[in-house]
Every structure is written in structure tokens, then in C-alpha cells.
Amino acid sequence: MSEYAKIPLLQAEDALQDLNEYVVCLDRILSRIGAGEAGADILLDYVVDRNVLRRLAELRTVLGDSLEEQVGEDRVDEIAEGSYQCAPRGSRPA
């Protein structure tokens, strides 16, 4: 088993572009909300208008498929299930 998961170049490029968009746009949106320049509806509009949930699901599939090749389906399921708590990474539930 390799220590590296492989992702096709085109999918890696798409993922980087999407993630960069999310970081930049969410930072701008949250700054505007925090400064009182916009309401929270701007965040919902962005998520819906830019198909963020669908695009994140596609990225999850790309990463999951790549990991599955290296560690197997059961381990990928364990990794994914660890996120259901929606707690910040590294924190422990009370």
C-alpha cells in the first residue's frame, strides 16, 4: 500500500479551483455579514447559485474513490462516518 492517494490531474485542478473559490468567497461573504453590510441570505444565495453542495459532493467522491484504492471501502466509510458529529476537527464531544 502506498502512502499516497492518486487523483487524476484534471480532477485535482478542478478541486483546487473549487476550493480556492470557496475560501475566497466565503471569506468575503462572512466579512460582509460580520461588518453588517449584508444579511445571512447572501450566504444562502451563494451556496445555491454556485451549486456548492453538488460540487462538494463531487469532490468528496473524487477523494473517496482515490482513498478507497489505497485503504479499502471499509476504512473510507470509517473516515467519512467520523465527520457526522459536525464538531471542529481535533475536538472531542462532551
Image (cartoon, helix red, strand yellow):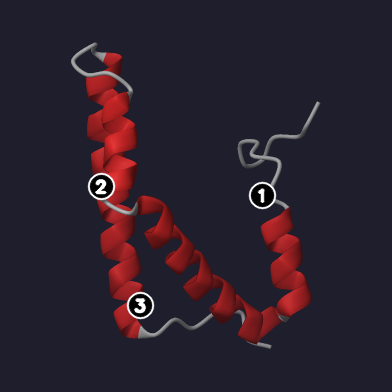
Circle 3 crowding by C-alpha within 10 Å: few under 14, some 14–19, many from 20: some
Q: Secondary structure under badge 2?
A: helix
Question: Quarter-wise, where is residue 42 in the image?
Answer: top left
Percent across and percent down for residue 9 are: 33, 83
Percent across and percent down for residue 62 are: 48, 74
- Amino acid carrying label 3: it is Gln
Label of residue 11 in the image: 3
Give the residue displayed 64% in from the left and 80% down from the top.
68
Residue at which label 1 appears: 83
87 shown above or below 11: above
Which mark's residue is nearer the viewer, 2 or 1?
A: 2
Give the residue displayed 35% in from the left and 77% down from the top.
11
Which mark's residue is nearer the viewer, 3 or 2?
A: 2
- Mark 2 and mark 1 lie on one chain; the one further toward the N terminus is 2
Q: Are marks 2 and 1 in contact (CB under 8 Å)?
A: no
Q: Quadrant of the C terminus?
A: top right
Instruction: Determine whether, in the image, residue 7 is placed left or right of residue 10.
Output: right
Q: Quadrant of the N terminus?
A: bottom right
- Amino acid carrying label 2: it is Asp
**Separation (CA) of disc 3 from disc 2:** 22 Å
Give the residue displayed 72% in from the left and 52% down from the top.
82
Is residue 24 visible from the viewing direction of this image? yes
Instruction: Determine whether, in the image, residue 29 is placed left or right of residue 52.
Output: left
- Amino acid carrying label 1: it is Ser
- Mark 3 and mark 2 lie on one chain; the one further toward the N terminus is 3
Label of residue 49 in the image: 2
Q: Residue furthest right?
A: 94
